Amino acid sequence: MSTWIQITPLQNIPLREGRCVTLGRKEIAVFHLPEKVLAIDNRCPHGQGPLCDGITTGTHVVCPLHGWKIDLETGMVARPDVPVGVKTYPCRVNSDGIVEINVAATQEAEVAA
Amino acid sequence: MTRKKLKQQLIVIGNGMAGIGCLEQILRHNHNFEVTVFGDETHVNYNRILLSSVLAGEKPVDDITLNPLAWYLEHKITLRLGIRVTSIDPTMRTISGDDGSVTSYDKLLIATGSKPFIPRIEGVEKDGVCAWRTLADTQWILNRTKPGTKAVVIGGGLLGLEAARGLQVQGCDVTIVHLRDRLMERQLDSTGGRYLRSKIEALGVKVLLEKSTAAILGNGHATGVRLTCGLELPADLIVVAAGISPNADLGKQAGLQVNRGIIVNDYLETSNPDIFAVGECTEHRGVCHGLVAPLLAQGKVLAATITGNRGATFEGAIPAAKLKIMGVDVFSAGSNEGGPGIETVKYEDESQGVYKRLFLDGGRLVGAILVGDSNDSHRYSEWLRTGANLSAKRRTLLFPDPIADNGDAAAMLSDADTVCGCLGVSKGQIIEAIHEKGVCTMAQLKECTRASTGCGSCGNLCMDILRAVAPNFEEETKKVLCKCVPFPQEQIKEMIRTQRMKSVQEVLDIYGNGIGCEVCKPALSYLVDVVNCGEHDEDRSTRFINDRVHANIQNDGTFSVIPRMRGGITTPDELRKIADVADKYKVPLVKVTGSQRIDLLGIKKEDLPKVWADLGMPSGQGYAKGVRMVKTCVGSTFCRFGTQDSIATGVELERRMENLFTPHKTKMAVVGCPRNCAEATVKDIGLVGQEGSWQVVVGGAAGKSVRKADLLITVSSTEEALAAAEVFFQYYRENANYLERTYDFVERHGIEKIRRDTVYAPDAIKEALLDRLTKSKNLSQDAWLERDNPINATQFVQIQPMEQPIMPPSPSYLRSSASAND
Ligand code: SRM
Ligand SMILES: Cc1cc2nc3c(=O)[nH]c(=O)nc-3n(C[C@H](O)[C@H](O)[C@H](O)COP(=O)(O)OP(=O)(O)OC[C@H]3O[C@@H](n4cnc5c(N)ncnc54)[C@H](O)[C@@H]3O)c2cc1C
Ligand code: SF4
Ligand code: FES
C-alpha cells in the first residue's frame, strides 16, 4: 500500500499560497513555496484559525486571525513564544507535477498519541 | 523701621504681540514691577500673523490666542481691555484713558503697533470698505463674505495678497488692484513678480497692475470702485491693504523724539528716560520694522534695559518675508536688487513655476528671492544672518545637498542658529528645553519655548531636533516599513516609480530580503498598485485573505458579505434578493451595519461566488483597505431642512471612488445641511451641504479615536465639491503611509499643507492628480466579478484530493476534533 496520496496538480496551489485539503477527517494545509511544498494541520493552535489562508513569510505562515506565526517545517509556533505546534506531513511533487502527501507516518503518530 | 520698597508701576500701552512679547521677557528677569496693560482691542493677546489663517478658514479664532486670561491672572497683571490711552503726561508721569481714568506710572512702555494706511480716495468712508489689521476686522470681513460676493483688494503686497486669498477661499470673486508694476514689489524683482502673478491668477484671483483707485462708488454702501483709468469694478466688499504707518501719535504728544515712528536707540530707550517703546510703533536706525521676529528681538533687549540690566543691544535685522498662501511659496530676504559688485545666481523653471535668485556680494549672501519653492528658505536666512563665506559652495547654492534631508538640516545647524524666525528661538534654546525641562513632544516645545507658534513653518525642523535630541521622543514619521524592506515608505514609492517595478516580489528581490512578511507584503501590494495606477502585476499571495476572496474573514474561518448599497439607498427588489440569499445559504446572521448597509455573516468560502451571483450586487469592499461607503442623509429630496441633494451627491461620490484601494479604509458621508445626520464631520471625507455651497471636510474619525474633520474648502457647486473630494482622495492615496487613516494623515501633514497641495495647488497639479485617479479607476473593477473569472482555479474552493487515504477506522475521540466545516 502506497503511503503517498496524490493531492492535486501543483499549479492548483499558487506560488507562496496555501490550500486546504481534507483527507479522511483531517484538514491539511498545503503550501507551495519557491523551493518546496510543505504540509501541516490546517487549524491554528491558538484559536482554530485556518492556516491555509495565511500569508507566508519564507517557510513560515502567519495565521489570518490573530497573527500567530507557525514554522511550516517543524509545525512549531514561532511567535508568540509558546511551546506548542501543529502536525507536519511529508509532502513532495512527483514527476508528473502532482503534489503528494504522506499521511501514514502521521496517522501512526496520531494513533500512538 | 525701614519700609519695604514700594513696587514700581509699569504701564504697557498696547496689548499686542510686541508689547506682551516684551512683557513675557521682563517676567523672566528679577523685577520689581506691578504691571498694568492697556489695550484698545477687546481680545487677550493673540497671534496677529494668523489672522490670515482665520480669514482663510484654516484656523478657528480660539486657536490663535497667545496669552489666555489665566496668564495675566497668574502673573498678577492688571488688564484694561477696550480702553484707549488718549494722552501721556510725562511730567506728572500719568496716562489718561478714554474711559476718563488717569493712572500713574514709574516706567511706561509704548507698544501701540501700527495702523493701516488709508489712501485718500473719494468715498473711502463708505460702508463696505475696511482695512485689515485686527481680529475685529477679520470677523467683520468674514460676516460680509459669502460665495459669490464681489470683492476688491486695494494693494498687492503681502497683506493684500493674503487678504485676497482669504476672500477667495470664502468663495468671493476677488480682484486685486495694485499701483505698481508687480506684486510684492518691495520683496521681489520683476521676474519674481511675474511668477507670483501667474500663481495668484491660477488661484482664481484677478490681478490688475499699475492701476490706482480714484473713487469708491455707491450711495452710502459701496457698490464698486472706479479706477483712474476709468474702469469700474463692481464690489460689495473692498479691503484696503495699502500699507501701514506706525502709531506714534502718543509719543509725539508726550514730547518724545518721533520721526515716522518713535525713535529708539539700540537699548530701545526713547528720548525720555522713563519711557520705552517697542514694536511697530518704533523707528530704529531709520527703520520701522513690520515683522514679528525683529520686534520680539527688540522686546528681549528692552526687557534687559528696563529691569536694570542694560547691556544687550538691538542692531537691526535683515528683512525677511514669507507669503502665507497655500500653494504659493514666496520667500524674500535681504536685498532684492542687483547693483555694482553684486553677483546674482538664478534658477528658473517655467513649467514648474519655480524661480530663485540669490544676490551675492564678495562671496556672501545679501539677498534671496524664492518663488514656487521656498523649501530652502531656512538655509538662506541663516547665510544672510551669519554672513558665511559661500565661495566654496558656489556651484550648489541653489540646490540642497543631495543627501541632506530635513534631519540633516537640523544637524547642520549650530546652536546659535535660529530655528523659529517668528519668535526668535535658536536651536540651542530648544535643546536646552529638551534637556532641562524634559520636553519631548511638539506641544511641550511650543508651550515651553514658543517655537513654531508664529507662522508655524519651522514645525518640521523643530520635530527633527526633537527627534534627534529628546531621549523619549517617539519616532513616528521616518519609520521604515519593516525588517524585510528597511526603507521608509516614501522612499519605497520613489524606488517603485523610478525603477518601474510592477510587482511586490520585484521590490522584495531588489530592495529587500527576497522573502517579505505579513507586514510588508500587503503594504507593498498597495504601493505597487497606487504608483502604477493599477497597471501592476497583481500577486494575490501578497494580499491578506480578505483581499484574495473579497470578503471579511470571521473568527470561525467563514466570511461576511456586504454588498454595495451606494449612499445607503436600496430597493425592494434588492432587499428581496438579500432575503432569498439569506434563506438559500442559511446565513446565520443578517445585520444592518453601522454604515447604512446590510451584512450577511457566516458564509462559507466556497459559497461566496454563488452568493455574489445570486445577489447580483457589487462588492461593498467591507473587507478591504479601500473605499468603504458613502453614508447619506435624506437631504433636499425629502427633508424639510435639506439645502442640498445629499443622496444623489453621495451616490455619485461613491460611484467615482468605489473599487479602489486606499492606504487604509476610507469612509465617507454626504449630508444635506449642517445638522449632519449622516455624521459627515467624523468621516475620512465628508460633504456638508449648506445654503448655496458645500463644505468639503477631511480627516474626521469616530472609531478608535474621535476627531472632527478639518475644512478642506468651501465651494458653491456640487461638481466642485466632488472634484475637491477626488483631488484629496487621490492625494491621500499617493501620499499616506499604508495603514494610515486620514485622521492621522491629515494631522501629520497639517491641513494647510494638504490644502496647498490639493485644492489650492496650481491647476496642472490638480489635473495630474485627477488624471492618475481616472487611470486607476478605469483599470479597477468590481472584485466580485471574479466569481466568473477567478484569478486562480482554486481561489474560492477547497482542493479535492485526487485520492483518499485508506483510513483505518478512527477511534471515536478523533472525530470530535474534525473541522467545523465538515
Ligand atoms: C460590520 C461592522 C459592524 C456592524 O455590524 O455594524 C464592522 C465590523 C468590523 N469592523 Fe468596524 N464595522 C463596521 C463599521 C464601523 C464603523 C462605523 C462606520 O463605518 O460608520 C466604525 C467607526 C468609523 C471608522 O472606521 O473610523 C468602525 C471602526 C472600526 C475600526 C477602528 C478604525 C479606526 O482606525 O479607528 C476597526 C479596526 C481597524 O480597522 O483597524 C474596525 C474593524 C472591524 C472588523 C473588520 C474587525 C476585523 O478586522 O475583523 C469587524 C468585522 C466584523 C466581522 O466579523 O466581519 N472597525 N467600524 C460595520 C461594517 C460597516 C460596513 O457596512 O462596511
Ligand atoms: C493679517 C496680518 C498678517 C501678518 N502676517 C505676518 C507674518 O506672516 N509675519 C510677520 O512677521 N508679521 C506679520 N504681520 C505683522 C505683525 O502682525 C506685526 O508686525 C505685529 O503684530 C506688530 O506687533 P506690535 O505689538 O508692534 O503691534 P500690534 O500687534 O498691532 O499691537 C499693538 C496693539 O496696541 C493697541 N493700541 C494702539 N494704540 C493704542 C492706544 N492708544 N491705547 C491702547 N491700545 C492701543 C492696538 O490696538 C494693538 O492691539 C501680519 C499682520 C497682519 C495684520
Ligand atoms: S466593535 Fe467592530 S471590531 Fe469590535 S466587536 Fe464590534 S464589530 Fe468587531
Ligand atoms: S487563531 Fe490563529 S492566531 Fe488566533
Image (cartoon, coloured by chain):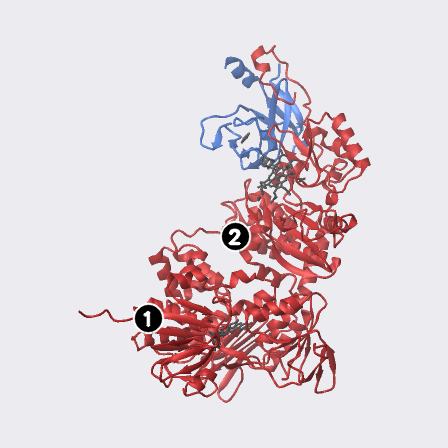
Q: Quadrant of residue B602?
A: top right
Mark in front: 1 vs 2: 1
Let me know if marks 1 and 2 both belong to one chain.
Answer: yes
Which label number is shown at residue B33?
1
For the colour red, the matching chain is B
Crowdedness near tag 1: few (<14), some (14–19) or many (≥20) residues, C-alpha within 10 Å = some
Which label number is shown at residue B728?
none
For the colour blue, the matching chain is A
Residue for point 62% across, 24% down: A100
Residue at the spot of label 2: B488
Q: Quadrant of residue B213?
A: bottom right
Q: Please indicate whether residue B369 sits to the left or right of residue B69 in the image.
A: right
Q: Nearer the viewer, residue B479 or B487?
A: B479
Image spot of residue B318 (x, y percent):
46, 79
Chain of the residue where label 1 is placed in the rendered structure: B
What is the quadrant of the C terminus of chain B in the image? top right
Q: Nearer the viewer, residue B479 or B751?
A: B751
Crowdedness near tag 2: few (<14), some (14–19) or many (≥20) residues, C-alpha within 10 Å = some
Q: Residue furthest bottom?
A: B340
